[in-house]
Image: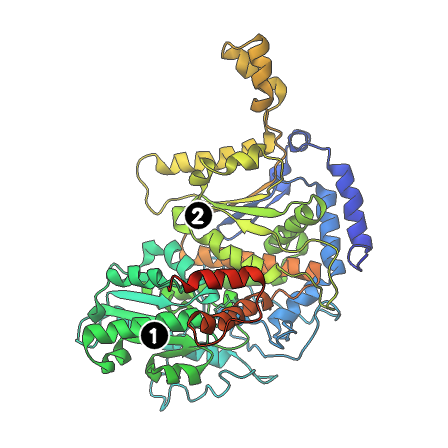
């Protein structure tokens, strides 16, 4: 048994699970009319209702004890404090610095294995009105008039030195983003033939795609009507080809986004896009006006031929899937404008401040994370559905899939020992009512428990008719039905009312029963504006952190992704005939052989 599973907090939860397993939530609601008040939380305009969970006060106490045993508060302090908690890559984890509106410096710290260390070391939080934008403000002063815009970026593509305050660089790059996005949006930055930019195409994959794509979709109502945003990620040539079909080279701006600037998919797509552009405009010189890059690898962006004035850097302490707050968010800034982008940062900052200051039992990310642990480790749930009742959030589940599954899809603990408990869950979902007509059947009546998060705005960005009332009625009805279920008695009464009786009734009855007792969280917000989206994303980022701390895993590396990056490298030359096919298993040899008669 691992240290975690034999720990007193874990064992206490195990015993508590045995006691709570037979209790139906119907009963819990009947017994406690104040259950909603006890198990809901507000932060700014965000309401987190977690009362429809299989918990009581004792559950929360025990889960909080588990977090305490894992030294969660100290670990939070270490992340915000810039310690190198991503120890397998010797990196700090400082996406929170990218939205640090406090005016305080943030220093890259020394290497620490957070679960083993003690002591809080948390700076006192600075309170921020929940509706405020981000006071981080892009530092235009350090951009304008600077002899070289990269002058102070000596650390790019290398590890930041311990003790360095990252905030001046953060502000400087935000300033560059503001200058560039303003210029594109107001028509100052024009294409090679002098026409204003109408289309931006982000070329990136994984963390360099999913965040900006999700956020641009979510914030469409705030977008400039003069700009369209496109995202090309897949190396499948179809993705680029279908995107280019819609575009005019004279008015298109490509942003090549890659932390490493070595990713095969991104570089392949970027090269093809460049060839398309030069082919259409007939001059290599056009590239300078139509290509920008976002990367930590400034040497590689230079070698690719991107005009240094259009290169936006970030740093090794920003993980790919945590990078939308950095220059990787440039498509968002272009699309909705820099002021709105800074509101997004402000929302995340509000959640950061809540996360680092609220007591665990009143802390949204802590509770959300611990509820996941409760179901994953004690009820054996294997997946978590995320169900936005807001069409603009249609890519949110896909975004969370990477955030959660890449971060917590780990099988060894921080000491390298195989864990004897489950870690990250499968995350999946679709916008609400579409899902209702598809996979909700399994959530209601299937054999597996699937905890689900329901997200909905009180106000639609597109009010009119009865759409929004119908949408919300569906959302609330689903969580109610999942909690209550339908007993055999209720189903029987319904069937009798429909005129059924005898054998026909008895045959149908079991199919009409819903066990209920299926847990859900509901997140309600005023409307999906940049500030709220920032809060929601940061909420889930910190949820992932909480779970990683409890499971004693490194949530910030991704060796599985790195493996994928290496694998095709060996087979590609074999497919092209540049190397002999060797060293594979019979299946892979067979597939390669099959292809050789049908050249791609
Ligand atoms: C994210 C992962 C991964 C990464 C992509 C793209 O946390 O590391 O999804 O973002 O593999 O990598 P580049 O940005 O380096 O092209």
Residue lying at the far bottom of the rendered structure:
147
Looking at the image, which residue is at 72% across and 54% down?
A: 421
Question: Between marks 1 and 2, how big is the CA–CA gap?
Answer: 43 Å
Task: Give the quadrant of the C terminus.
Answer: bottom left
SS at mark 2 in the image: loop
Mark 1 near mark 2, Cβ–Cβ under 8 Å? no
Q: Is residue 270 visible?
A: yes
Q: Is residue 233 above or below residue 506?
A: below
Q: Position of residue 327 (x, y in %)?
A: 42, 72
Looking at the image, which residue is at 18% across and 71% down?
A: 195
Disc 2: residue Cβ within 8 A of ligand 1's nearest atom: no
Circle 2 residue? 526
Looking at the image, which residue is at 58% across and 32% down?
A: 445
Circle 1 residue? 271
Q: Position of residue 566 (x, y in %)?
A: 53, 72
Q: Position of residue 435 (x, y in %)?
A: 46, 40
Task: Give the quadrant of the N terminus.
Answer: bottom right
Q: In the rendered picture of this protein, how many numbered marks are placed on residues?
A: 2
Tell which tag, 1 or 2, sits nearer the viewer. Answer: 1
Around disc 1, counting alpha carbons within 10 Å, would you say few (fewer than 14), some (14 to 19), or many (20 or more)?
few
Q: Position of residue 188 (x, y in %)?
A: 23, 75
SS at mark 1 in the image: helix
Query: Camera-side residue: 479 or 446?
Result: 446
């Amino acid at each position: 048994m691992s240290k975690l599973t034999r720990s007193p907090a874990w064992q206490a939860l195990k015993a508590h699970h045995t006691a709570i397993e037979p209790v139906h939530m119907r009963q819990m609601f009947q017994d406690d009319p104040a259950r909603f008040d006890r198990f809901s939380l507000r932060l700014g305009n965000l309401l987190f209702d977690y009362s429809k969970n299989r918990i009581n006060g004792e559950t929360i106490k025990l889960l909080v004890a588990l977090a305490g045993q894992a030294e969660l508060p100290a670990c939070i302090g270490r992340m915000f404090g810039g310690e190198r908690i991503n120890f397998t890559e010797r990196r700090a984890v400082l996406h929170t610095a990218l939205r640090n509106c406090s005016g305080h410096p943030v220093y890259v710290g020394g290497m620490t294995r957070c679960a083993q260390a003690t002591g809080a070391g948390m700076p006192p939080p600075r309170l921020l009105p929940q509706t405020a934008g981000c006071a981080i403000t892009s530092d235009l002063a350090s951009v304008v008039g600077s002899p070289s815009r990269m002058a102070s970026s000596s650390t790019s593509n290398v590890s930041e030195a311990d003790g360095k305050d990252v905030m001046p660089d953060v502000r400087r790059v935000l300033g560059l983003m503001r200058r560039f996005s303003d210029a594109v949006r107001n028509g100052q930055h024009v294409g090679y033939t002098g026409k204003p930019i109408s289309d931006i195409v982000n070329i990136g994959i994984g963390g360099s795609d999913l965040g900006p794509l999700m956020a641009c979709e979510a914030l469409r109502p705030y977008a400039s009507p003069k700009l369209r945003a496109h995202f090309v990620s897949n190396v499948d040539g179809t993705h680029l080809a279908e995107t280019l079909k819609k575009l005019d080279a004279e008015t298109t701006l490509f942003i090549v986004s890659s932390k490493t600037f070595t990713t095969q998919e991104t570089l392949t797509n970027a090269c093809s896009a460049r060839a398309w552009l030069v082919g259409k405009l007939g001059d290599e010189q056009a590239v300078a006006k139509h290509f920008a890059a976002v990367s930590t690898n400034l040497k590689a962006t230079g070698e690719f031929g991107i005009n240094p004035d259009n290169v936006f850097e970030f740093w090794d302490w920003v993980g790919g899937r945590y990078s939308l707050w950095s220059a990787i968010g440039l498509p968002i800034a272009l699309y909705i404008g820099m002021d709105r982008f800074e509101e997004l940062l402000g929302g995340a900052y509000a959640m950061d401040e809540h996360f680092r200051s609220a007591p665990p039992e009143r802390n949204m990310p802590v509770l959300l994370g611990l509820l996941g642990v409760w179901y994953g480790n004690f009820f054996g749930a294997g997946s978590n559905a995320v169900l936005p009742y807001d069409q603009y959030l249609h890519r949110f589940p896909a975004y969370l899939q990477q955030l959660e599954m890449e971060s917590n899809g780990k099988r060894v603990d921080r000491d390298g020992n195989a864990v004897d408990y489950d870690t990250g869950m499968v995350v999946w979902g679709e916008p609400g009512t579409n899902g209702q007509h598809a996979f909700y059947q399994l959530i209601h009546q299937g054999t597996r428990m699937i905890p689900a998060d329901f997200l909905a705005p009180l106000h639609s960005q597109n009010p009119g008719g009865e759409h929004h009332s119908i949408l919300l009625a569906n959302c609330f009805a689903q969580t109610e039905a999942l909690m209550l279920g339908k007993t055999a008695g209720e189903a029987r009464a319904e069937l009798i009312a429909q005129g059924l009786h005898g054998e026909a009734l008895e045959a149908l009855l079991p199919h009409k029963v819903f066990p209920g007792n299926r847990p859900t969280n509901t997140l309600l917000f005023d409307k999906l504006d940049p500030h709220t989206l920032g809060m929601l994303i940061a909420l889930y980022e910190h949820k992932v952190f909480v779970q990683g701390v409890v499971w004693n895993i490194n949530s910030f590396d991704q060796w599985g992704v790195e493996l994928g990056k290496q694998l095709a490298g060996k087979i590609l030359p074999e497919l092209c005939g540049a190397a002999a096919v060797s060293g594979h298993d019979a299946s892979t040899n067979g597939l390669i052989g099959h292809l050789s008669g049908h050249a791609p």
